[in-house]
Image (cartoon, rainbow, N blue to C red):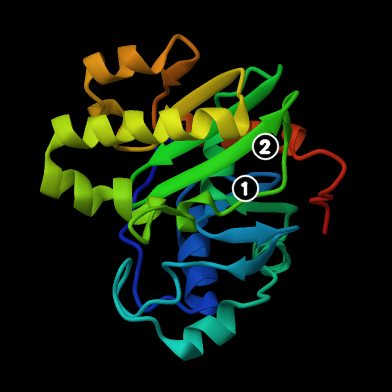
Amino acid sequence: MRARPLRVVTPYPLPPALFVETLLDLGGRLPAADRVTVGMPGMIRHGVVVATPHYVTRSGPRSKVDPDLVAEWSGYDARGALAAAFGVPALVLNDAEVHGAGVVAGTGCELVLTLGTGLGSALFDGGVLAPHLELSHAPVRWGTTYDTYVGEPERRRLGDAFWSRRIRQVVDGLRPVFRWDRLYLGGGNSRLIRPEQLARMGDDVVVVPNTAGIVGGVRAWDLVGDRYDPTP
């Protein structure tokens, strides 16, 4: 670590120009760097935004979607814009992928689930990042998505004990889908999972610190594989 982490409130509404401006301001308060890694919510392919669920809303997650913002973000070359703004090579990934890059061992099939506002996910095979899947938008039951089923609003409504039981049910349901060698539970809410529920998930499920995203920002450059050339 060369500096203490900085935290700012995400401004809304958030068009791409303000997104870049906010990151430039943060970067200007940190030591000089030779490259930039950015993790953001949504489907990102080769640094281009396919869809981002929160940044297209008027006042943040679960608020009204602004059609103009949807148009601005759809197909937005975030990697190119950030590389040009910072003047250094940039890597732009889904935020769960950056988080996962900081914790995976690099052997076997490793799934990362991040628990926070919603549910983030990233899959690694032999330490190489697989194409991103927006698992959070898949229905889990009664027409409810994973994002809604285990996100922060539900944790607050249910309390940690019942919410932790839901997390275990999600893990049990995903196990036959991925057949992982190791599952990592990260994100800001992972530390709130009750020990008794974590113990029932099995020895191949571990909780990792939310600070892993900082390490992941460095390691991600070695894990993206040949499918992604981060050099502008």
Where is 99 relative to 53, above or below?
A: above
In the visual, does 158 lie left or right of 217? left
Residue 121, x across and y down, in percent: 52, 42
Decide which of 174, 130 is in the foreground and name it.
174
Crowdedness of circle 1 by 10 Å Cα count: few (<14), some, many (20+)? Answer: many
**Given the image, on which type of amino acid does mark 1 rest?**
Thr
Residue 171, x across and y down, in percent: 42, 30
Residue 145 visible in image? yes
Where is 31 relative to 54, above or below?
A: above
In the visual, does 131 lie left or right of 4? right
Indicate the quadrant where residue 158 lies. top left
Residue 220, label in figure: 2
Residue lying farthest right?
226
Question: Label 1 vs label 2: CA separation?
Answer: 8 Å
Q: Are marks 1 and 2 in contact (CB under 8 Å)?
A: yes
Viewer-nearest of discs 1 and 2:
2
Residue ID at (12%, 39%): 159
Is label 2 in a helix, a strand or a loop? Answer: helix
Decide which of 14, 163 is in the foreground and name it.
163
Q: First in sequence: mark 1 or mark 2?
A: 1
- Look at mark 1 in the image and give the residue it sits on: 37
What count of labels does the image hold? 2
Residue 77, x across and y down, in percent: 70, 70
**Given the image, on which type of amino acid does mark 2 rest?**
Ala
Residue ID at (20%, 44%): 155
Residue 210, x across and y down, in percent: 39, 32
Is label 1 in a helix, a strand or a loop? Answer: strand
